[in-house]
Amino acid sequence: MKKFLPALLFTFFAFTMIAVIMRFVPIGDPHLPGYADFIASDVTKAKVIEKADSVALHYARNGSLDTGALDIIAATIFDYRGYDTLFEVTVLFTSLIGVLSVIGTKES
Amino acid sequence: MWIGMILSRIDYIVTVILFCIGLYALIVKPNLIKKIIGMNVIETSVYLFFIASADVRLGPASWQWAGPPEIKDAAEAALAAAGQVPLVNPIPSALILTAIVVSVSLTAISLALSIKIYEHYGTLDTRKIMRLKG
Amino acid sequence: MDEKNRKKPEYDAGVVIQLVTRMMCPFIMMFGIYLITHGHLTPGGGFQGGVVIASAYILFALVFGKTEARAGASGFTLKCLASTGIYLYIGAGLAGIFLGYHFLANKAAGIFPCGMLGELLSAGTLFWIDIGVGLAVASIFTDLFYTFLEEKRDDVYIKNKKELPLKRRWSDVDRNDSE
């Protein structure tokens, strides 16, 4: 009983979340906030967009021209979001320092 | 109709199930290592949710826009013949790449603290650790 | 290290595993270097390549023991490499400031080669940032794993197991430890 109750609770929780997710748009449907530009534009005839409201569309169209990288993910994480990646590496280094300070030294 | 609705959102449903499994392990299991495993499962479900929601085809890839015009025309002709476009939304993938590294840092710190807790208390059972008081 | 000075490993993993590890480690590292240096051209990048290189070091430590692994990659060396990687990143960012542009300016600064689209030295700062991140991630992951492997523990509890009053009080619930 003590273990059964949490399982029941989480099953109820899962069904609630699935009921909410059924109201989402299906996977691959661009009818989401943030893709309004993309829906308005014609995909096959679109030119390079100078000013796009949607960030994703701007990256997808102008990424190689702005950064010179073929890989759009590299262009995103190292150029457009360079600060993010810099502090991410700093977080990793800080975690190393934390682990070393916790278990790397021997107490007397 | 229900089958179609479920199949078109099957990734989200797998995400929810993974999230609930992780939350169960995080809350119910008394062992600290299993709590950390549950935390990682929750993080994995969040990654899956982001990647699944990023599957919006945004047209030809960016190098096709930047390249010489004959390459772009050939790519567009091939795309029109295939009836689909290759590039998905790149931003969630970049965000998740950041989140994975942060989760590794979090797991490392948690495991180090678990080692210290085991040295101090002699157990990883949170019920016993909470009752011991020092 | 030559054969005479080589210490006996902590445990013997077996001839087959040792031989295959010795054969595979250079190729795993080469694949990681490929992922790092071609990060702006193909899927992959600094993080993925760094993790692949770190996996080679971790495989070596698992098979040959921690002392032999630490002989090639000591904590000081790994921390120096990690700092070098992060400073490379910051230096690639500061180069934009010294030329009068913003931090991490890529094409506008023009100090790094921006060749044709698709060449190796094409994306300006991205190539150098990739190398810095890969260096940092590889050394940090290796050092994390080696630290967990060595784990200089205090052994306060382990030695005085019976003298601690905590253990006696809750010894009745101890059998549920693995739950």
Image (tube, grey):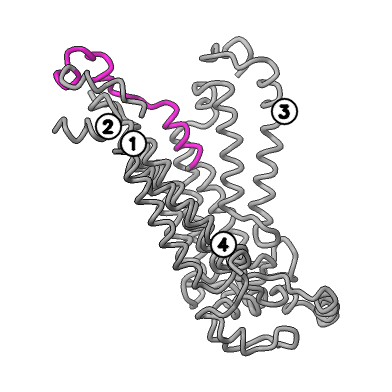
Of tags 1 and 2, which is closer to the observer? 1
Instruction: Identify the magenta region.
Output: C141-167
User: Are the numbered discs 3 and 1 placed on the same chain, yes or no?
Assistant: no
Instruction: Look at the numbered disc 1 and give the secondary structure of its residue.
Output: helix
Q: What is the spatial separation of the Cα atoms under label 3 and label 1, in whole angstroms?
A: 38 Å
Q: Earlier in the sequence, mark 4 or mark 1?
A: 1
Do dots 3 and 2 share one subunit?
Answer: no
Q: Amino acid at mark 4?
A: Ile
Label ID, residue C23: 3
* Nearer the camera: disc 4 or disc 2: 4
| Tag nearer the camera, 3 or 2 | 2
Q: CA distance from mark 3 to mark 4?
A: 36 Å
Tell me, yes or no, whether the highlighted magenta stretch contains residue C82. Answer: no
Mark linked to residue B51: 4
Marks 1 and 2: CB-CB under 8 Å? Answer: yes
Q: Position of residue A89 (x, y in %)?
A: 46, 54
Q: Which mark is residue B117?
A: 2
Q: Are marks 1 and 2 on the same chain?
A: yes
Marks 4 and 2 belong to one chain: yes
Chain that bears disc 1: B
Provide the residue designation for mark 1: B32
